[in-house]
């Protein structure tokens, strides 16, 4: 496997080409951003921890029938993944109230939702990743109706699996964001699944173990990621 040119550098990761056109390397940085990059910082070793946590979750989901881009770990900050054409929507699932549900609807943080909320947001920083419904996604040709159906079905399956995965580690999955992409086999799960993209609260205590420590200046940011890593990898 040969690492080739940089294809893209985002806020938290870098993508590199490989000698195989169907595979890319996903490199995890320590950079942290929040509130559409209005807040910027860095968390020591975050990239290493997110690479490892994401790999474990993708392996778990793959083993439970959720097709995803993960191929294998290459180094402490790099994973080999299948190259996809990202569907430009962020898919958010919420099990309990937090973040923008509080800000936009005045809902009480921590309230258990009577059923999970499934949201699409347009993946476009210039427009602040606005919330959209299925009609926007299809009518703006971001995805077909069939793709939307597949994404919804896979997302609900991921939610059920991940809720159980984290509960076994005494962690509650409050909400999370997924990204999907197209490859020759159809729609697969891509990007990362980590404390950067999930809200994770310790069961019983409600202690935040995710990027909210960075967003809201809660302190001991690195330790939150370390705790998730420890539980996820069983070390
Ligand atoms: P952002 O672009 O929001 O700053 P990142 O820093 O996480 O985000 O950059 C990673 C980029 O790679 C994202 O835009 C994501 O959609 C994209 N991506 C994730 N997985 C794949 C993949 N398997 N193939 C191609 N692109 C991917
Ligand atoms: N999220 C994400 N990337 C984004 C927006 C949201 O990973 O660009 C995740 C976030 O970590 C949380 C969930 O999606 O787990 C819901 O986020 P919310 O809409 O509450 O937004 P925020 O409070 O982060 O602005």
Image (cartoon, helix red, strand yellow):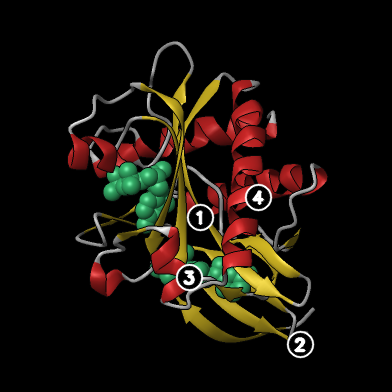
Who comes first in sequence, dot 2 or dot 1?
A: 2
* Left or right, 91 with reference to 188: left
Q: CA distance from mark 4 to mark 2?
A: 30 Å
Q: How many marks?
A: 4
Q: CA distance from mark 3 to mark 4?
A: 18 Å
Q: CA distance from mark 2 to mark 1?
A: 24 Å
Vertical position of residue 167 compared to residue 233: above or below: above
Q: Position of residue 182 (x, y in %)?
A: 65, 73
Task: Identify the residue position indicated by label 4 in the image.
Answer: 154
Q: Position of residue 62 (x, y in %)?
A: 77, 49
Q: CA distance from mark 1 to mark 3?
A: 34 Å
Q: What number is the disc on residue 138?
A: 3
Within 10 angstroms of label 2, few (less than 14), some, or many (20 or more) residues?
few
Q: Which quadrant is home to the N terminus?
A: bottom right
Q: Name the front one of labels 1 and 3.
A: 3
In-front residue for pair 36/56: 36
- Element on which disc 2 rests: loop
* Left or right, 151 with reference to 124: right
Disc 4 residue lies near ligand 1 with CB under 8 A: no
Q: Name the front one of labels 1 and 4.
A: 4
Who comes first in sequence, dot 2 or dot 3?
A: 2
Who comes first in sequence, dot 3 or dot 4?
A: 3
- Element on which disc 3 rests: helix
Task: Identify the residue position indicated by label 1 in the image.
Answer: 47
Q: Name the front one of labels 3 and 4.
A: 3
Q: Name the front one of labels 4 and 2.
A: 4
Q: Which quadrant is home to the C terminus?
A: top right
Which of the 4 image quarters holds residue 36? Answer: bottom left
Q: Is residue 10 visible?
A: no
Q: Measuring 61% from the left and 57% from the top, which residue is drawn there?
A: 149
Q: Measuring 76% from the left and 87% from the top, which residue is drawn there?
A: 19
Q: Measuring 65% from the left and 83% from the top, which residue is drawn there?
A: 17
């Amino acid at each position: 496997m040969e690492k080739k040119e940089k294809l893209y550098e985002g806020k938290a990761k870098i993508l590199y080409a490989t000698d195989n056109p169907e595979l890319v390397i996903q490199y995890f940085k320590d950079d942290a951003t929040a509130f559409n990059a209005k807040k910027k910082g860095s968390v020591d070793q975050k990239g290493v921890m997110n690479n490892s946590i994401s790999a474990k979750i993708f392996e778990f989901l793959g083993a439970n029938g959720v097709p995803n881009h993960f191929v294998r770990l290459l180094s402490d900050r790099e994973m080999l993944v299948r190259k996809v054409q990202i569907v430009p929507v962020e898919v958010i699932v919420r099990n309990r109230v937090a973040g923008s549900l509080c800000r936009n609807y005045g809902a009480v943080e921590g309230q258990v939702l009577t059923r999970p909320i499934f949201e699409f947001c347009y993946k476009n920083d210039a427009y602040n990743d606005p919330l959209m419904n299925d009609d926007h996604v299809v009518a703006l040709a971001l995805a077909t109706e069939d793709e939307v159906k597949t994404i919804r079905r896979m997302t609900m399956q991921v939610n059920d699996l991940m809720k159980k995965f984290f509960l076994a580690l005494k962690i509650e999955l409050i909400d999370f964001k997924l990204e999907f992409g197209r490859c020759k086999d159809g729609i697969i799960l891509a990007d990362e699944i980590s404390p950067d993209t999930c809200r994770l609260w310790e069961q019983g205590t409600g202690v935040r173990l995710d990027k909210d420590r960075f967003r809201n200046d809660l302190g001991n940011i690195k330790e939150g990621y370390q705790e998730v890593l420890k539980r996820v990898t069983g070390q």
